[in-house]
Amino acid sequence: MAKSQSPLLGSNRRRYRRHRPGHSSTFRNFRATIAGSKWSVPPVNNGPYRKDSTERGSAREYLSRSALLAGLLAVLLGVTALRGYQVLENSGAFRVRQITVQGCRTVREEQLLALAEIRQGAPLLGFNLSEAKQRIRQHPWIDRVNIQRSWPDTLLIKVQERRPLALINLEGGQGLHYVDQNGIVFAPVEAGQDLDFPVITGISLPRIPPGFSLREGAAADAVQFLQLTAQGNPILPMQALSEVRVSREQGIIAYLAERPFPIYIGCGNIKPRYYQLVRLLERLYRKEKIDHIREIRMDYQLGRILVASLEP
């Protein structure tokens, strides 16, 4: 029996090709059409924030050019100002023709002008005020100084001298020196100067360093006592004192100008001691007993005063 032949075999066999997954024919046709044309990526539109490269380059170039012009203008102005300053300095229009000095009582004007190195006819514009102030401050009597230009040809010098509070008689042959309101020993006493001040005694120093201040111990108490008397209390003003002696053991001892007896004030608590003494002296003056006093002691107990009398 002959075998039946499959219709898939032999010459009449049909060939079947497995269909592979992929794109459809429609997509392939579309891709072929696009590939044949000129394709370009469309530009991205960022709306109002889009910046064109040409515009950015122009802006940078404009800024660079502006900066260059500004620099050249600044240099030109600087050179012009310098030249103008030199012309004004060397011209005769702004030269020192008048010098006014205010505040001198002890220091002579000639001394100040010599320290400041000011001369008539010097250029007013080129005068160094700061250096002149520093030189004037070297004078021991000068506390503050101010120098101003007054156009077109005047210099105004204002000084504030130190105000003496007392004299100090330094042991060791150094003689009398002035003490200012802050207790600073600032200048020796020269011939013809004012001596109408109380004298601080009992302090021995090998030498006076610049700006030496009486700040410690009994010396500071003496300065505070004198500052209180300088306030002008009519019972015990500064003019009523002749001497304030400094003692390490006893504190400060005051002497009145018109009375020979000592007043032993002691150490510390100077302000209450001063006002206690004022009240005591007021009673003694009122009762006319001041002439019979031998000594007054305030140094043995705070708040209590011992008055020794010449009468039995």
Image (cartoon, rainbow, N blue to C red):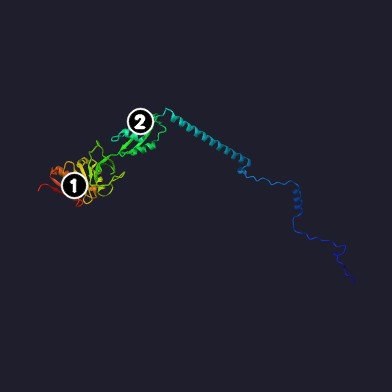
Q: Amino acid at mark 2?
A: Ile
Q: Return the disc, 1 or 2, that comes first in the chain's sequence.
A: 2
Q: Indicate the position of residue 186 as horizontal and vertical percent values.
A: 29, 41
User: Relative to residue 223, is residue 89 drawn left or right?
Assistant: right
Judged from this view, the residue extending furthest toward the bottom is 1
Q: Quadrant of residue 94?
A: top left
Dividing the image into 4 quarters, which one contains the N terminus? Answer: bottom right
Q: Front-most of 92 and 53?
A: 92
- Single out the mark in the foreground, 1 or 2: 2
User: Relative to residue 79, is residue 50 drawn left or right?
Assistant: right
Q: Indicate the position of residue 137 as horizontal and vertical percent values.
A: 34, 39
Judged from this view, the residue extending furthest toward the left is 312
Q: Indicate the position of residue 112 as horizontal and vertical percent values.
A: 33, 35
Residue at x-position 44% and y-position 29%:
90
Q: Which residue is mark 2?
A: 99
Judged from this view, the residue extending furthest toward the top is 92
Count of marks overlaid on the render: 2
Residue 263, disc:
1
Q: Secondary structure at mark 1?
A: strand
Q: Front-most of 175 and 43?
A: 175
